[in-house]
Image: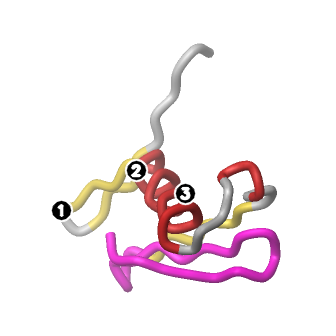
Amino acid sequence: MKKSEIYIQYADQEVQIQDVLDKIKEQWTKDMGNEEDDLEELKVYIKPEDNAAYYVINGDVTGSFGL
C-alpha cells in the first residue's frame, strides 16, 4: 500500500487522522519546544462526544485540543 487515509465521521463532522497527528507534532515542536525526533511514543484518543483529541507522548506528556 502506497498511501492510506483514515477519517472519523460523526455528527455531520469529519476528521482526518493525519490532521490530528500533524497538530500534535506542531504542539510538541512549536508550543513545547521539543525536537520532532524526541517524540518516540504517541497514543491518541479521539472522543467525538467531547469534540476533542487527547494524547500522551512518551508516556508522560499529555495534551488535548478541539477537533
Q: Report if the CB atoms under discs 2 and 1 are less than 8 Å apart.
A: no
- The residue furthest front is 33
Q: State which quadrant residue 42 falls in.
A: bottom right
Calculate the distance from the C-alpha at mark 2 to the C-alpha at mark 1. 18 Å
Can you give x and y, in whole percent of width and height, for residue 30 in the image?
49, 64
- Point out the stretch of residues depicted in magenta: 48-67
Instruction: Please name the predominant secondary structure of the magenta segment in the image.
Output: strand
- Give SS at disc 3: helix
Q: Can residue 66 be found in the magenta stretch?
A: yes
How many numbered marks have been drawn onto this rendered protein structure? 3
Measured in 3D between alpha carbons, the distance from the residue under mark 3 to the one under mark 2, in whole angstroms, is 10 Å
Tell me the residue at 78%/82% (across/down): 60
Say whether residue 47 is left or right of residue 34. Answer: left
Q: Which mark is first along the chain, 2 or 3?
A: 2
Q: Kindly report which numbered mark, 2 or 1, lies closer to the viewer in this rendering.
A: 2
Q: Nearer the viewer, residue 11 or 25?
A: 25
Question: Which kind of residue does numbered mark 2 sit on?
Answer: Asp
The mark closer to the camera, 3 or 1, is 3
